[in-house]
Amino acid sequence: MKIPLRVYADTSVFGGCFEEKFSEASTRFFDQVRDGTFVLVVSDVTLEELDPAPPYVKSLLGTVPAGHVEQVATSDESKRLQLAYLNAAVVGPACENDAAHIAVATIATVDIIVSWNFKHIVHYDKIMGYEAVNVRHGYRSPRIYSPYEVINL
């Protein structure tokens, strides 16, 4: 039996289901979570960002079987790593939630992070920055991709 990959999805993947440009890949990603291809990992950061979202976006999480979702939380350790990303200028202070997503996912040792945020997360320069900080602090870096890159077509 193949063990499913643990995939952390940031808020953009949820909203992507309802944006023309991203809907096909985001919807397919959630279909594959539902069928057990992936375990969806979400954090309190994701849930807080989803809170003000329209009900149809928030309700998406409820369509995933409970056994296919893992919830992780920020910790003192993830907050220190988030601060290390900010201090290394991987992203600026205005992007502290983006750094929080990467930190919490790193501490949770997920396999992959998926996001549609091509400016602060899924960008070669940012990925190298996150990885450099992780190496300096002794962490294994999760792979970072857009949902399109991880779905089975």
Image: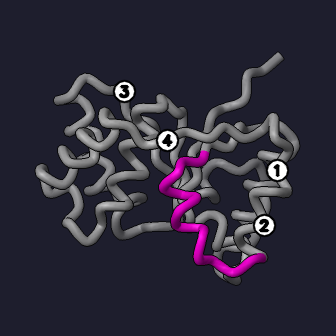
What residue is shown at x 32% (from left), y 54% (from top)? Answer: 99
Q: Position of residue 12 (x, y in %)?
A: 56, 67
Q: Position of residue 147 (x, y in %)?
A: 62, 57
Q: Which residue is mark 4?
A: 73
| Circle number at residue 140 | 3
What residue is shown at x 18% (from left), y 54% (from top)? Answer: 86
Q: Position of residue 30 (x, y in %)?
A: 77, 55
The image quadrant that residue 71 belongs to is top right
Query: Contact, CB < 8 Å: mark 3 with mark 4?
Result: no
Label 4 sits on what residue type?
Answer: Ala
Q: Which residue is mark 1?
A: 64
For the N terminus, which image quadrant? top right
> Mark 3 or mark 2, which is nearer to you?
2
Local packing at callout 1 (Cα closer than 10 Å; few below 14, some 14-19, many 20+) is some
Mark 4 or 1 closer to N-term?
A: 1
> Mark 3 or mark 4, which is nearer to you?
4
Between 89 and 79, the one nearer to me in the picture: 79
Label 2 sits on what residue type?
Answer: Ser
Label 1 sits on what residue type?
Answer: Val
Which stretch is magenta?
42-55
Q: How far is mark 3 from mark 4, CA to CA?
A: 18 Å
What residue is shown at x 42% (from left), y 67% (from top)? Answer: 118
Residue that sits furthest to the top in the current view: 1
